[in-house]
Image (cartoon, rainbow, N blue to C red):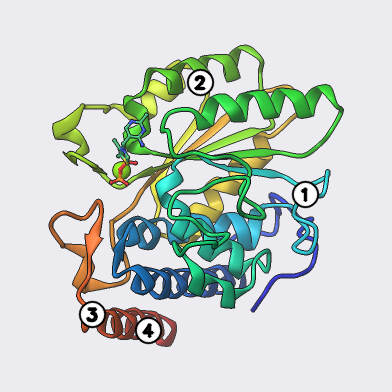
Amino acid sequence: MVLTQEKAARGKASGVGKERVDRVEGAAFRIRHHALNMGEVQGQGYVGQALGAADMLAVVYADQLRFRADDPEWDGRDRFLLSTGHYAIGHYAALAEAGIIPVKELETYGSDNSRLPMSGMSTYTPGMEISGGSLGHGLSIAVGAALGLRYQGSDSRVYNFLSDGELDEGSTWEAAMGAHHHQLGNLTAMVDINALQADGKTDTVLRTEPITEKWQAFGWYAQRVDGNDVSALLAAFDNAATQAAAVGRPSVILCDTKVGRGVPLLEDREKAHFMRIEEHEWQLCREQLTAGYEGKAAR
Ligand SMILES: Cc1ncc(C[n+]2csc(CCOP(=O)(O)OP(=O)(O)O)c2C)c(N)n1
Ligand SMILES: [Mg+2]
């Protein structure tokens, strides 16, 4: 299903019913499928992150975000800022699922003259609000955007997607302080805690725990959830939306995810930050993904 209509309902009070969960899980499945197809074009890439974060992206694009698919720069849109430029493959998949870019265009991922470079760039891609390849800057930009929108009297919200590696960056915490200082109740951050970074496991690179308490100490409304559980994510985003206000506490949703989620072949792969996947493995990945999705749907 391609969502072409304006998504206006945010933070629905309707509860987390089966129909809503099924719809978002369907979107997450297609996002994963798109990401595998794009990865195959290059033979390698940040596929594990896209699979891990697909449920978060599906909740955002299929349920929470207000946008017009045929007018990505519409003034009244919510802003989704991808801090982590290397997650662009997952973001492109979500933009295609949302109808903002054509599914067919995903085949051009990472190729010369493509609008879909391997690292997200705002000047190339509709719906890509910032160029986030230099990590640790997204939240600062989100703070400025949220403040600016409030000054303009806009009711649009700002969502910022960060990775756990970005919690190593001092600038992230400066921005967190700024958001609290300015009482940016129109700002929601989400952190993909996949326990991994370029140099290895997060807890061996730099211990960032206890993460929830840190955000709380910085004045944020913090929730920690299983980031691969769509029901839990929907409930957390609904809670955040209930808190949202022009002036109020910013929200953060801390999402524990698994790299490669949905494709057992990739879930336990070493060197998961930048995966090399052999030519014969791509089809197997798609089959495993489909089997897992259909098996879950049948239960
Ligand atoms: C400011 C900055 N420093 C270093 C890098 C190099 N870099 C690219 S991805 C990455 C890992 C960051 O952690 P995370 O996003 O959690 O990694 P992942 O979960 O994708 O493995 C690093 C250090 C960068 N892009 N920007
Ligand atoms: Mg990580």
Which of 34/160 is in front? 34
- In the picture of the structure, the residue carrying the numbered disc 3 is 279
Question: Secondary structure under badge 4?
Answer: helix
Front of the two marks 2 and 1: 1
- In the picture of the structure, the residue carrying the numbered disc 4 is 290
Which of 12/3 is in front? 3
Q: State the CA–CA distance, disc 2 to disc 4.
A: 39 Å
Q: State the CA–CA distance, disc 2 to disc 3.
A: 43 Å
- The outermost residue toward the top is 181
Q: Tell me, yes or no, whether the two marked residues, 2 and 3, touch with CB atoms within 8 Å.
A: no
Quadrant containing ligand 2 reads top left
Answer few, some or many: residues within 10 Å of disc 3's Cα (few below 14, many 20 plus, some between 14 and 19). few
Answer few, some or many: residues within 10 Å of disc 4's Cα (few below 14, many 20 plus, some between 14 and 19). some
- In the picture of the structure, the residue carrying the numbered disc 1 is 73
The amino acid beneath tag 1 is Glu
The percent coordinates of residue 268 (x first, y second) are 16, 62
- The outermost residue toward the right is 153
Pointer 1 or 3: first along the chain: 1
Pointer 2 or 3: first along the chain: 2
Quick check: can you spot residue 232?
no
- In the picture of the structure, the residue carrying the numbered disc 2 is 176
Which of 116/254 is in front? 116
The amino acid beneath tag 2 is Ala
The amino acid beneath tag 3 is Glu
